[in-house]
Amino acid sequence: MSDALSYRPKAGEIPTTPGVYRFRDATGRILYVGKAKNLRARLSNYFAPLHSLHERTRRMVTTATGVEWTVVGTEVEALQLEWMWINEFDPPFNVQFKDDKSYPYLAVTLADEAPRALVTRTEGIKGARYFGPYPKVWAVHETIELMLKAFPIRTCNNANYKRAMQSGKPCFAGQIGRCFGPCSGLVSIEDHRTIVNEFVSFMGSHDKKLINELTQEMKDAAAAQQYEIAGKRRDQVRALNAVLEKSAVVLRDNVDIDLFAIEQDELAAAVQLFIVRGGRIRGVRGWMVDKELDVTMSELIDSMMQTAYNNDTKPPREIVLPELPDDAEALETWLADIAGRKVRLVAARRGEKAALLVTATNNARQALMLYKTRRSSDFVARSKALEDIQEALEMPAAPLRMECYDVSHLSGTNIVASMVVFEDGLPRKDEYRRFNIPESTDDTDSIYQILTRRLAYLKPETISADAAFNAADIDESDIAQVEQKRAKFKYQPNLLIVDGGQPQVAAAKRALAESGVTGIQLCGIAKRLEEIWLPDSDYPVILPRNSDALFLIQRIRDEAHRFAITHQRIRRKKDISSILGEIAGLGPARVKVLLQHFGSVARLKVASVAEIADVRGIGPVLAESIYAHLRA
């Protein structure tokens, strides 16, 4: 099947040196840019038999009409060229980082005659020194308020500064005590520059040495009865201590790192950056990532580094990552060129940095969940998703009501299934249903059973799906009970989704055909490749990787899986308790102690009488009873 790619170059034509490759479509647009240490080995992966490729990769290579490459000298040069071309061409199949908001920074305009401190969301001010980003704008203003008490510097804008310097009158901010630059008439340009340098030095290092020096000056001034000077130094020390207290202390004072955490699923990833300076979290920044192709963690980290750092944003000496990428050495060299000094990449495995990584990962997990929730609640996105599903599955109307089914079990025991309902793209949790399956041969049989039971409620001629009554045998109370039960399943779905591929869809189709119910579209979603399977189809429907339609179907499937797993765990817990509860003398408290001690019934079953008797509250006689009952 690889012969279908007519543009495939001969293996001997592809060099074995480092380089950057580009896939183009018929219009010449660059679809994907990648780098390789060995171009021939890397490109051969794309030209493997099509059936062996991941579906997203297969779609990319079949969309492309040509591939070209550029040879470079080293892997570092390949990394640099890849970064430049990704930024220039914005290829649709490369990882797309979306910063969901702009972050406020504290900036000091060192290139000005009299540098000023300001709050800005604009990066790249020439000659400015940036501190942050801060999670909230009020946090920057609060920091400036405190710092001005210790380092009185200019805050007025350039127009007011020029007007004040030309007229000799203080600027308006200076008149109300909000600006302490040369324009206020309180300090010379040279002395102001000295204060600015101290301001920048403290913000860059949070070094307590300055606080100690000011504290000593305060004591000396007090001893010399220079109480005004002592009071100023006291206020400066308080302000600087307040700034330090507002930064979370997480590591040692001499630790300056950037720490990245990533939480991802099949379609998206959330990135959290913790900026730690002087052992304190100085800023937090987050990105969302839309993944068109399936990428490894290593490839995602490469793209993340290219997004986070450039000539305006330089990396610190150490960067902490969830794991080291395959090209860690080349990445370190590339980052060192940007920083102008050595940069080290480390993977946090244990200790205080690993603990901070856990915190950052929790934040990334919350960000990913929030991203999905907000995307799901967007009316325009939901409408577009339903329209796209209708078009992709060739439905006569948009699927305003969708039901999804999933089966869960533990090694073939405690088999349960879930039914979740989405209307207008939103969950209807009051109409979720759970099914217990007494006996089943496999997942396809389970799917067949639950859909047979569910679809029975849609038959107009069927009074009850669970009992076959004769009309003469039904009294009014029976009819009321049946109608109440039917009301739980009275609405017919437009689209019925099962979790699985062709076998599960075939089982669902058989149940649908036997029920005689019409007007319902059926499909399945295979988790590994996120493919949509239709009945009697040899090929899946492939929805765009970052489309709202696939996102919605994936969310329905995940919700069904969560609901089934929750029910299965409840059943399992009840079964375990009931098994042990059958033993005379073994009440709920002792059952709890046994499970806590052994961790599971499986371990309890293989335990000896002596091991059971060692458990607190379990004597030899009761241990014998437990041992015999579990093996009966």
Image (cartoon, grey):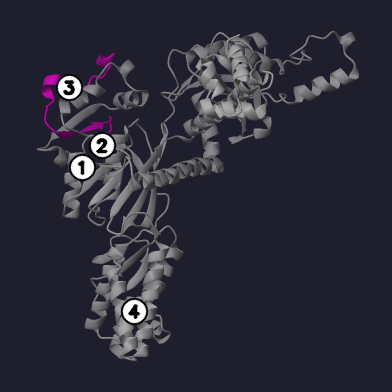
Viewport quadrant of the N terminus: top left
Could you tell which of marks 2 and 3 lies nearer the N-terminus? 3
Amino acid tagged 3? Pro
Q: Position of residue 595 (x, y in %)?
A: 56, 26
- Whichever of callouts 3 and 1 sits on the residue coming sooner in the sequence is 3
- Per the image, the residue denoted by label 4 is 152
- Relative to 166, 372 lies left or right: right
Q: Quadrant of the C terminus?
A: top right
Residue 143, placed above or below residue 273: below
Gap in angstroms between the C-alphas marked 1 and 4: 41 Å
The answer to the question of whether label 2 and label 1 lie on touching residues, with beta carbons closer than 8 A, is yes
Q: Amino acid at mark 4?
A: Pro
Residue 533, image x and y in percent? 48, 18
Q: x and y percent of residue 138 in the render? A: 46, 65
- What residue is pinned by disc 1? 331
Can residue 498 be seen?
A: no
Which residue matches tag 3?
9
Magenta segment: 1-29
Q: Amino acid at mark 1?
A: Leu
* 564 w.r.t. 74: above or below: above
Please tell me whether mark 2 sits on a helix, a strand or a loop: loop
Ranked by sequence position, the earlier of labels 1 and 4 is 4
Answer with left or right where residue 141 lies relative to residue 346: right
Observer-nearest residue: 18 or 325? 325
Residue 312 visible: yes
C-alpha distance separating marks 4 and 2: 45 Å
The residue wearing badge 2 is 325
Q: Is residue 7 magenta?
A: yes
**Disc 3, SS:** loop
Q: Going by the image, does 135 lie left or right of 109?
A: right
Q: Residues within 10 Å of mark 2 (few under 14, many from 20)?
A: many
Residue 187 lies, with reference to residue 95, above or below; the image says below
